[in-house]
Image: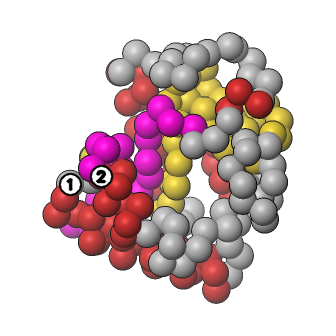
């Protein structure tokens, strides 16, 4: 399995990957409340790829996972009570982490989170922070298994009516 930044030639396939994941979630339990063909989608993959922060996980030539890793919390992280006071730019944020539904339970998510941790450390960041929809139990379990600490729920002022609060996690180095 290889994890690397998404390249221009990967955008369509990564968009199809996210479409497959979101369709599966919508047909079952949509824990992250993602919207099919809206977010995450090919257009969000294109934007994040252009910014150099979209990553893909490839196994035998097929995308089996994807995530965004950058230093943009996409909301007011200062509304939370973090264990360590850090300025924006001192920590990375993991977004839209997803694994192939047919392969879930095989450690792909853990490998992607481990990659995020190693990458953030190699770039001299002091922590990784992230937010999760409060009832996204699978994501919460994954991050807790990877030693992230739950620090509480907060309004990140993202103006998403169906998600007034987000559960926040951090891993300090």
Residue drawn at point x = 61 percent, y = 68 percent: 34
Locate residue 104, reporting x and y percent: 53, 66
Residue 66 sits in quarter = bottom left
Locate residue 173, reporting x and y percent: 55, 16
Residue at the extreme left: 9
The residue where tag 2 is placed is 49
Q: Secondary structure at mark 1?
A: loop
Q: Residues within 10 Å of mark 2 (few under 14, many from 20)?
A: some
Give the answer, above or below, for where 166 lies relative to 18: above
Mark 1–mark 2 CB contact (< 8 Å): yes
Give the answer, above or below, for where 126 lies relative to 131: above
The residue where tag 1 is placed is 7
Give the answer, above or below, for where 141 lies relative to 46: above
Specify the segment rendered in magenta. Answer: 50-73
Residue drawn at point x = 56 percent, y = 62 percent: 105
Q: Is residue 56 visible?
A: no
Describe residue 46's horizontal placement relative to residue 44 as left or right. Answer: left
Locate residue 63, reporting x and y percent: 32, 65
Mark 1 or mark 2, earlier in chain: 1
**Front-most of 68 and 50?**
50
Residue drawn at point x = 50 percent, y = 36 percent: 72
Q: Is residue 153 visible?
A: yes
Q: Whole-Å distance between the Cαs marked 1 and 2?
A: 7 Å
């Amino acid at each position: 399995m290889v994890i690397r930044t998404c390249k221009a030639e990967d955008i369509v396939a990564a968009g199809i990957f996210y479409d497959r994941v979101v369709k599966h979630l919508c047909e079952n339990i949509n824990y992250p409340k993602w919207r099919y063909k809206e977010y995450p989608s090919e257009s969000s993959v294109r934007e994040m790829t252009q910014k150099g922060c979209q990553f893909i996980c490839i196994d035998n030539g097929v995308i089996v996972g994807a995530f965004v890793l950058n230093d943009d919390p996409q909301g007011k992280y200062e509304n939370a009570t973090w264990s360590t006071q850090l300025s924006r730019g001192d920590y990375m944020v993991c977004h839209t982490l997803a694994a192939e539904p047919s392969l879930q339970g095989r450690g792909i998510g853990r490998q992607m989170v481990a990659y995020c941790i190693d990458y953030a450390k190699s770039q001299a960041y002091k922590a990784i922070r992230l937010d999760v929809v409060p009832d996204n139990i699978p994501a919460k379990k994954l991050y807790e298994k990877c030693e992230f600490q739950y620090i509480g729920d907060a309004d990140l002022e993202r103006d998403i009516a169906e998600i007034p609060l987000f559960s926040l996690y951090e891993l300090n180095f």
